[in-house]
Amino acid sequence: MTLVSVLIPVYNGDTFLAAALESALRQTHHDLEILVGDDCSTDTSRELAEAYAARDPRIRVLPALERNLGAPRNQIRLHQAARGGFIKPLLQDDLLAPRCVQTLLAGLRADETAALATSKRGLIDASGQRLPDQPWTAALTDGDVHADGIELGDAMLRSNANLVGEVTTVLYRAGLVPPEELWTLDGHEYRGNGDIVLWLKLLAGRHAFYTPNELSFFRQHPGQASHRPDIIIGGSIEWARMTVAARGFGYLSDPAAELAAHTQAAATAERAFQLAAGHPEFLPQLSDALGPLLARVELLSSAPPVIAETLAG
C-alpha cells in the first residue's frame, strides 16, 4: 500500500468538520494518515477532531498553537508534518467521494512524469445539497487523460480560471515544492490564488492526470473567506502578478497566448478597481501589480479608462 497524507487545516470549522472527517475515513484507499491542523479555533473544532482521533489511529491532531498562524502558514505546518509520499488536501468545509484517493492515486502512479491528479468537482450548499454546475466546474474532458502541464497552465492563465480545482480536488506528489514555498511567488504570499501558484509550480515540465468523474465536493456558504472584498480584490492583484511571473516557469512562451493572458488579467483587474472604490487602501497595490502587466504587452494606451487613469495618477 502507499501512504497518502490527508491534510485538513481548520479554523472555527466545527459546523462542517465532522462531515469532512467522515468523508476521509470512508476512502476506499485505507493507507492514510489524516492530519488536522487547528489554527487556534474559538469553537469546538479541536475537541471534535480529538474525539475522532481517539476513535481512529489514522487521525492525528497537530499540537495546539499559542497564536493564530493564518491559513497559508497553517497549511505549511501540515505539509511539514506529513509522512506520506502523496498529499491530499481537504478543506474543513468540503467532502471527498469514497473513491477519490484511490482513483487519483492510480492516475498519478500510471505516469511517473505526472505531478498532480485532479477531477471534476461538484458544488454543494451549506446543507450538503447538490448545486448546479458552473462553467468553472464543468468537466474538462469526456474521459481520463494525462495532460501536458505547460498546456494546462497556459489554459488557466489565458482564462484566469482555476481549471485544476481548489485544493480539495487535487492529489499531488510530496516533496516537489518545499512547504515554505507552496504559496509564494516572486516574494509575494498568495492568499486568494495560492492554490493556482502551487499548481503552476507542480505542472511546470511535468504532466497532470484528469478524470471527469466527480470525486470531491466544494461547499459554498456565506461564511467563506472567498466572499470577502479584500480576498476578491487581492485575487485580482495576484492574477496580474502571476501572469507576469509565469514566463519564468516556462508558461506563455507563445506571444499570442501571453497577450491573451495579460488582456484577461487586465479585465479582471478592471472589475477589481470598481470594487476597490469602497476600499481605497487596495488601489496602490492594484496599480503596482498592473504596471508590469500592461507594460509587458504595451496595453497602457488601450487599457480601460479606470485603469489608465489610476496608473497615470
Image (tube, helix red, strand yellow):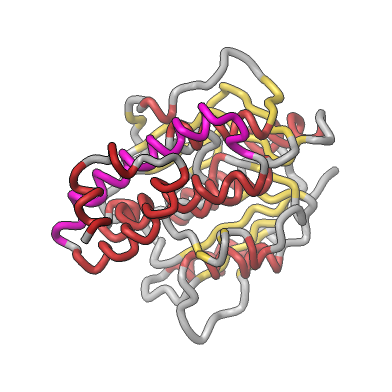
Can residue 25 be spotted in the picture? no
**Span colored in magenta:** 251-278
Front-most of residues 89 and 43? 89
Q: Is residue 100 above or below residue 295?
A: above
Q: Is residue 238 above or below residue 27?
A: below
Front-most of residues 204 and 76? 204
Can residue 288 be spotted in the picture? yes
Q: Residue at x 65, y 67 (%)?
A: 180
Classify the position of the C terminus by image quarter.
Answer: bottom left
Q: Residue at x 43, y 32 (%)?
A: 159
Residue 60: x and y, percent? 66, 66
Residue 78: x and y, percent? 63, 65
Residue 273: x and y, percent? 23, 51
Q: Residue at x 39, y 66 (%)?
A: 12
Classify the position of the N terminus by image quarter.
Answer: top right
**Image-quadrant location for residue 287:** bottom left
Front-most of residues 29 and 279? 279
Dominant SS type (magenta): helix
Task: Count numbered badges in the picture.
Answer: 0
Q: Residue at x 39, y 34 (%)?
A: 123
Front-most of residues 199 and 41? 199
